[in-house]
Amino acid sequence: MNRLTIIGNLTKDPELRTTATGLSVCSFTVAVNRRKTHANQNPDADYFRVTAWRQLGENCAKFLQKGRKAAVIGSVSVSTYTGNDGKTRASLEVLAEEVEFLSSAHDQAKESGLMPDDTPKDGQTGMEIAEPEDLPF
């Protein structure tokens, strides 16, 4: 059984295309951080090219953006190619069967600056305390 589950962040906005036969196909890359880090450095990451077809691809193009977190489940294939420097490299590609959008709409609004940061400041919770005589029951 060839089934891979990854969770990571998109490295750039998804690209939606349509084939000559009218099928939608969406491509994007997910960076998955490794648990181990080198001393005083950011964690290493693995990069997976993801391809999603038809309605799944259209939804990915609509709801995903660079930096958003997503979980992808699908089959994986490895292809090799020769880079510009003449070295042979390998590329991992996932044919998506399921994609779950893990960044919430609330997180997305904060990222875009459309919503103020609602973190309480100086011990304030933003809630008013009602006096017992003000309660309607």
Image (spheres, helix red, strand yellow):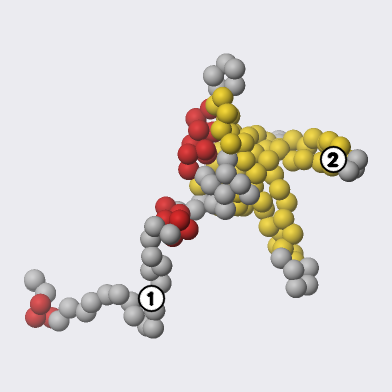
Say if residue 5 shows up in the picture.
no
Q: Position of residue 78 (x, y in %)?
A: 78, 37
Location of the C terminus by quadrant is bottom left
Per the image, the residue denoted by label 2 is: 83
Q: Amino acid at mark 1?
A: Pro
Residue at 86% x, 37% y is 82
Q: Quadrant of residue 14?
A: top right
User: 10 Å neighbourhood of mark 1: few (<14), some, or many (≥20)?
Assistant: few
Residue at 38% x, 75% y is 120
Badge 2 marks a residue whose secondary structure is loop
Alpha carbon distance from label 1 to label 2: 50 Å
Q: How many marks?
A: 2
Q: Amino acid at mark 2?
A: Gly
Per the image, the residue denoted by label 1 is: 120
Residue at 38% x, 60% y is 115
- Which one is earlier in the sequence, the residue at label 1 or at label 2? 2
Badge 1 marks a residue whose secondary structure is loop
Is 22 placed left or right of 131 in the picture? right
